[in-house]
Amino acid sequence: MTQAPGPRLARAKLPVARACACAGVLLAVCALAVSAAAARGVSIRHDGSSVSRGRARHDVRALTGVTAVGRASSAGGGGLSLIVEPDQGLSEIDREIATAERSVEVTMYELDDTTVEQELVADKRRGVRVRVLLNGGYYGGGSSVNDGATRYLRANGVSVRTSSASFALTHQKTITIDDRTSLVMTLNLTSRYYATSRDFAVVDTQTADVAAIEQAFDADWSHTSISPSAGSGDLVWSPGAESEQIALIDSARSTLDVENEEMADSAITSALCNVARRRVQVRVVMTDEDSWREAFDTLAACGVGVRTYAADAPLYIHAKEILVDGREAFVGSQNFSWTSLQDNRELGIVTFARVIVSRLGQTFASDFRGASPFGA
């Protein structure tokens, strides 16, 4: 079985139901809705509603004012560096996978990228140990998104397993190479989203972090229960991340900047409001959806500066980041929902690395300028 090469960034984003799962929609219903919507160029969102997206290509930088810059230097990063999407493309991630010498371990919510799939097969053929752990279902249902990749990889000798039913979802997005580097990402390996999704990947070479991620991978691979290690102290795991996220939010003293795909956890909304009431400047940038309107109203009423992108805008906010006082940052897979924080398998990382915090701040500022005030 062969796959035709998948051109990188050449495909316009064709949104599908990224988060039918997040609304607990049964797979059969979700799949039918997505299939019908795809034929019309319509997006199905978290609450099952649809928004017209069309198929036109857009210039994201023209909308946000973001200019492409290189990957942040590891200098001052303490073994960490940053990749910003869609600005930088997937070349760094491709290179990490393609140059593996001993092992590749992938944990991914969604995998639908023929380039990555071919790189994994090429690694396997070179004698690299390749293991791919994919989300096993949507709240008890199966996952059609990963079916094509699963068939192709298995047909070419790559070991693929689905995640344990003990998690509502495996929403973690990591790649670990040769026991030396782990990419902790907000993005799925889904090529149709690359061109217009705001996302981040932290490249982590800290020995304790990589070891902790590998230990959790081995446990999840064998469906064995584990309380994952925080590594060097900076890893944030779900289930059980809500208290850590709230503590990080509460620590803000001057500024708090947030990007997220969801605003569905009342404890998070309350924490953001509590910080704003202390006269901390709190700003939130998201893609506008009906599901989050009530939370947006609450945030705006308590003094949070909420700005949004329309559902059909050329930039979709898929990133999950928290910036505290311009000195500390969180980046990871966790959305602001109870399920994501408390029931899913998720992973994020907190860092004080100046180069990363500064780059995230620049990106947030551009995204905030490009968005519209909520309710305007």
Image (cartoon, rainbow, N blue to C red):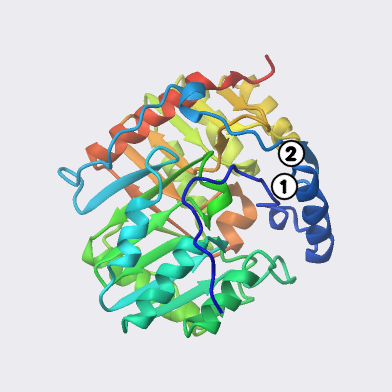
* Residue depicted at x 46% and y 19%: 279
Front-lying residue, 225 or 178: 178
User: In the picture shown, does residue 158 fall above or below 95?
Assistant: below
Q: Residue 291 carries which label?
A: 2
Q: Check if mark 2's residue and mark 1's residue have beta carbons within 8 Å.
A: yes
Left or right: 356, with 11 as reference point: left
* Residue depicted at x 49% and y 44%: 320
Quarter of the image with the C terminus in it: top right
Q: Residue 256 carries which label?
A: none
Q: What residue type is labelled 1?
A: His
- Disc nearer the start of the sequence (2/1): 1
**Residue 166 seen anywhere in this rendered image of the structure:** yes
Instruction: Identify the residue under disc 1.
Output: 46
Q: Give how far across and how far down residue 42 sits, in percent.
A: 76, 42
User: In the picture shown, does residue 335 fall above or below 170?
Assistant: above
* Residue depicted at x 44% and y 78%: 131
| Tag 1 secondary structure | loop
Q: Give how far across and how far down residue 252 sits, in percent.
A: 39, 32
* Residue depicted at x 40% and y 30%: 363
Q: Quadrant of residue 174?
A: bottom left
Q: What residue type is labelled 2?
A: Ser
